[in-house]
Image (cartoon, rainbow, N blue to C red):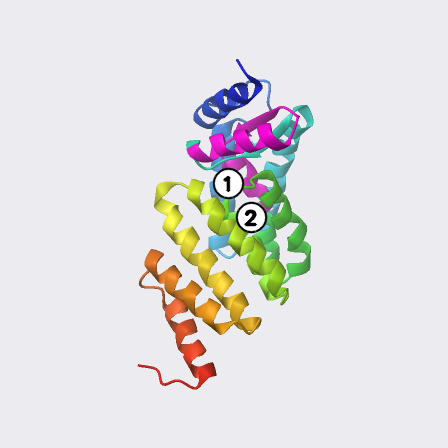
Amino acid sequence: MSFRRSIIASAVCLIATPAAAADLMTDAQAEQLSSAIFNDIVAGKPASAIDKADELIAAFNVRQAKRAHACAESQEQAEALAKKNDAEVTMELTIVGPAWCDGYFYKGYALIDLGRGREALPWLQLAHDRAPLNAHYTNELAEWFKAQKDWKRSFGLFEEALRSAETAPDGQRALYKARALRGMGFNKIEMGQLDEAETLFNESLTYQPDSPAAANELKYIKQIRGEPNT
């Protein structure tokens, strides 16, 4: 069995089954904790969410100390990560389900909710690095740089999210693509490239036709040009 195939086999196994008994937290427990963190955020309890996120991060670090891990949302994404690792890296990689990387992402999100946006960046970056094909994580990282008015860095990350969305679960691909295209369009407006921005917003509407955000930005472009809105 080739090295790449052994990684893919691990991806298939670890996404579908619980972690080894020697680990302190199972896959099922990680998923439950991830859901609890999300519920805290929705309920407006970011401090509680951070406490739970730290617990999930610590458990994932136990795994990382034994062998490099990456998170995937789908079988297609797991195989793409395995091929990427085989082509670019020489280390052995274990691919696990998405819940394991949610601790980084949710901690960053909760810090933003607490008004501590600058502290959020390392956690959003870690989420991206541990799950490099997760378009949702990449879109959020791009949003962080957009908020800092780093238009070029933000655009590049949204562009990356658009590519990564090709391996997202079927039910999420259109949503992730639409959001990435809107982000790219917003940055193009700020860089004064209105024609390109208009094209991107129109493309986003092919994935999410009822998006008021895209429609409003297209109206804004017309306003900048001095054109009537019809």
Choose top left, top right, bottom left or bottom right for residue 62. top right
Circle 1 SS class: helix
CA neighbours of label 1 inside 10 A, class few (<14), some (14 to 19), many (20+): many
Residue flagged by tag 2: what amino acid is it? Tyr
Q: Which residue is mark 2?
A: 106
Q: Main secondary structure of the magenta part?
A: helix
Is residue 118 something that shows in the picture? yes
Circle 2 SS class: helix
Identified at 51% across, 57% down, the residue is 44
- Please report whichever mark, 2 or 1, sits nearer to the chain's N-terminal start: 1
- Towards the viewer: 222 or 168: 222
Choose top left, top right, bottom left or bottom right for residue 168. top left
Residue flagged by tag 1: what amino acid is it? Ser
Residue 136 position, x and y percent, is: 49, 49
Residue 211 versus residue 32 in the image, above or below: below
Identified at 41% across, 68% down, the residue is 213
Q: For the magenta stretch, what is the residue range?
A: 76-104
Gap in Å between the C-alphas at discs 2 and 1?
8 Å
Residue 15 position, x and y percent, is: 46, 28
Is residue 40 something that shows in the picture? no
Identified at 65% across, 35% down, the residue is 58
Residue 7 versus residue 152 in the image, above or below: above
- Towards the viewer: 108 or 9: 9
Q: Which mark, residue 34?
A: 1
Q: How many marks?
A: 2
Quarter of the figure with the C terminus: bottom left
Residue 52 position, x and y percent, is: 58, 42
Question: Within the magenta stretch, is there residue 98?
Answer: yes
